[in-house]
Amino acid sequence: MPELPELQALAEGLDETLSGKEITTVRAHLPAALKSADPPPDALVGRRVAKVWRRGKLIGLDTGDLSVVIHLMSAGRLGITDSKAARAPRNAVFDIGFGEEGRLRLRELSSTHRASVHVLTPGALDAHRPLARLGPEPLGLEPQAWKEALSQPQARLHTALRDGRRVAGIGRCYADEIMWAARLAPFASSTRLSDEEWERLATGADLVLAQAIDRARGRISTDLPNKEARLTVAHDHYGDPCLRCGTSLERVSYVSYELVYCPHCQTDDRVYADRRRSRFLR
Ligand SMILES: [Zn+2]
């Protein structure tokens, strides 16, 4: 699932490639993915791209007085394809064509079809709820702003970190990485952190996200790969030794993912209950 670093690299690559290019065709392969009715997507034809941007996990494309906002959700992927094939692949959702320059294609890897496209006027862009409700961008956020964003209402820290309305762009992967870097317990109550812990969170998030953006720029420019080849130290490393202290990393398993942490560095040698673990112990 793409998160802030991958989407930032993609937005920068697309901006560099598409800015100034004229939109020649628009095609909704999956009409239900287009969630806005007016203006019609054909209104984009003949306009030039002014900017491609990212906010949270949303990608936007401005053409002066009309914008396209793309929600990739977990299985949407976006990239430029120069395929000349007459038939689009089955996973194609929405194409914005640029003549001979190829087309920007939204595709979806799962059959749940949650990725969506909105074509918006400036007023509708300002009012677009998923954008308007987003919390601040995490990179460079001061400790006090982290506290304001995450502490109320009370939640487990890992959950609060992944809530885009509190702070934008962080998902399961970078939540694990940031918690590990900041040596914070994923299930700590967001109302009970000390000032020193908020500082650790701000520093850890900056370190993790800046490094991840740098790496993402090296491998992503105009197409988001189906699988993120990320370099992580905690996420997806259950059972591996912690790079800081050597303790085996623990996990808490959920239906479709697992949260990974170091029980020595992060939870004072406490191991959280895990349904997979308790099945073995029974
Ligand atoms: Zn450790």
Image (spheres, rainbow, N blue to C red):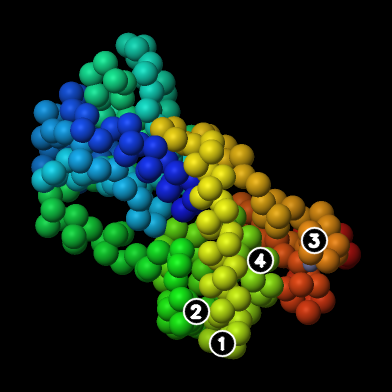
Viewer-nearest residue: 253 or 52: 52
Q: Secondary structure at mark 1?
A: helix
Residue where numbered disc 2 is placed: 143
Residue 102 place in picture, x, y as percent: 31, 21
Residue 1 place in picture, x, y as percent: 52, 47
Question: What residue is shown at x 11% (from left), y 28% (from top)?
Answer: 46
Question: What residue is shown at x 49% (from left), y 37% (from top)?
Answer: 220
| Amino acid marked by disc 1 | Asp
Residues under numbered marks 1 and 2 in contact, where contact means CB atoms less than 8 Å apart: yes
Residue 189 place in picture, x, y as percent: 59, 82
Residue where numbered disc 1 is placed: 195
How many angstroms separate mark 3 from mark 1 (CA)?
25 Å
- Callout in the foreground (2, 3): 2
Vertical comparison of 99 with 19: above or below: above
Residue where numbered disc 3 is placed: 242
Q: Secondary structure at mark 2?
A: helix
Quadrant observed for ligand 1 in the rendered image: bottom right
Which of pointers 4 and 2 lies earlier in the amino acid sequence?
2
Mark 2: give few (<14), some (14-19) or many (20+) Cα within 10 Å. Answer: some
Question: What residue is shown at x 57% (from left), y 37% (from top)?
Answer: 227
How many angstroms separate mark 1 from mark 2 (CA)?
8 Å
